[in-house]
Image (cartoon, rainbow, N blue to C red):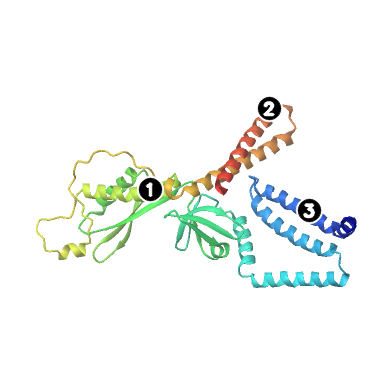
Amino acid sequence: MEKLQSLLAEIPGLLLPLLPLLAVVAFASLVLYYLSKKGREPSEGARYRSQWMTLLVVLVALCAAIIVLPVSDSLQGNLLTMLGLLLTAIITLSSTTIAANAMAGLMIRSLENFKPGDFIQVNNHFGRVTEQDLFHIEIQTEDRDLLTLPNVYVAANPVKVVHASGTVVTAEVTLGYELDHHDIEKLLKQAAEDAGLSEPFVYVMDLGDFSVCYRVAGFLENVRTLLSARSKLRRHMLDKLHGADVEIVSPNFMNQRQVADQTFIPQPQYRPRLAEEKAPEAIVFDKAEKAQSLQELKDDYEELKQEVAKLEAEKDTDNKAKIEKKRRSQKAIRLMIQRLEERKES
């Protein structure tokens, strides 16, 4: 019993030198918790700032922990030297990966060429952006798979971004010289209009040895249905050309075949009207759709935030009702963003 009492009496003396270290750990933990909450805010760039600040806080906390350790000055100096050498080695060895990706991520972020939900193509990789992080970009491909591209790779290669306000959908077909190009251009323009494209036009791309290459194009306003629009355009091209008795087959092959009074055009048949097919983009780009919806909510939140700040700066008493209304809308959008992010993490 006496030994236990003496041990309990010595505990305050043992913990007293460790109080500065515990204070540093507690303070760093509180700051990291605050940064994690700030990183989930809907404001633009909050996640990037949180990541950088977290890294800085961890480094400062390590240095402070070594300084307040109850050890001799020489040992503290050695520990700080070792920490410096360790950080130098990490930066040197990872300069081509972590540091390079972080710098490339900042560059991509500052350019603001694309955002979550946009269609992009980097070399042979095509899909919709689902995440933009400090070290990588994630896209959802046409197969619904998720593809991670390092920021260095994206920064070092040309990036094709489908414009969010609309894009041009194209398709090509090769036909024989015996066909009048005026008739073909008219049929192809009708196919583009039937596919839901506006302002269609036709290019003559190439005059080959055996065929002429035509490219039909039209403007698509809703880029979310890009895959469906490409397929629909080709289907209507088949319908229009076959409906006008235009045979889509290589003239080189046609000149060599030994058949009499036979064509390779499917004859029109009665087909019952089918219900309109569901756009495959809802399945293929499900994560990208959620990412775009989340990004649009964040943009609306930021816009409302700026409007509230502008009304408050005017200091007009008549603006109180407007400010209160916009703040309620801002709060509702914030709750929607939090719910979407919780679903995304789950």
Q: Distance between the residues labelled 1 and 2?
A: 45 Å
Residues tagged 3 and 2 counted as in contact (Cβ below 8 A)? no
Task: Name the residue type under label 3.
Answer: Ala
Res. 258 image quadrant: bottom left
Q: Look at discs 1 and 2 and give the one toward the viewer.
A: 1
- Sort mark 1 into few (<14), some (14-19) or many (20+) by Cα contacts within 10 Å: some
Res. 85 image quadrant: bottom right
Most distant residue in the front direction: 1
Task: Name the residue type under label 1.
Answer: Ser
Which residue occupies the foreground of this view, 142 or 222? 142
Q: Where is residue 84 in the image (x, y as percent from the top left)?
A: 76, 70
| Residue 307 versus residue 182 in the image, above or below | above
Q: Which residue is drawn at 32% across and 43% down?
A: 194
Residue 79 seen in the current view: yes
Q: Position of residue 288 (x, y in %)?
A: 50, 49
| Quadrant (top left/top right/bottom left/bottom right) for the N terminus | bottom right
Residue 164 seen in the current view: no
Q: Which residue is drawn at 63% across and 59% down?
A: 106
If you read the primary sequence from the N terminus, does the residue marked by circle 3 or circle 1 appear first?
A: 3
Q: Distance between the residues labelled 3 and 1?
A: 55 Å
Q: Look at discs 3 and 1 and give the one toward the viewer.
A: 3
Q: Mark 2 points at which residue?
A: 321
Most distant residue in the left direction: 260
Q: Mark 3 points at which residue?
A: 26
Q: Position of residue 259 (x, y in %)?
A: 11, 60
Answer with left or right where residue 265 lies relative to residue 81.
left
Q: Which residue is drawn at 58% across and 45% down?
A: 342
* Local secondary structure at mark 1: helix
If you read the primary sequence from the N terminus, does the residue marked by circle 1 or circle 2 appear first?
A: 1
* Local secondary structure at mark 2: helix
Q: Name the residue under label 1.
A: 228
- Sort mark 3 into few (<14), some (14-19) or many (20+) by Cα contacts within 10 Å: few
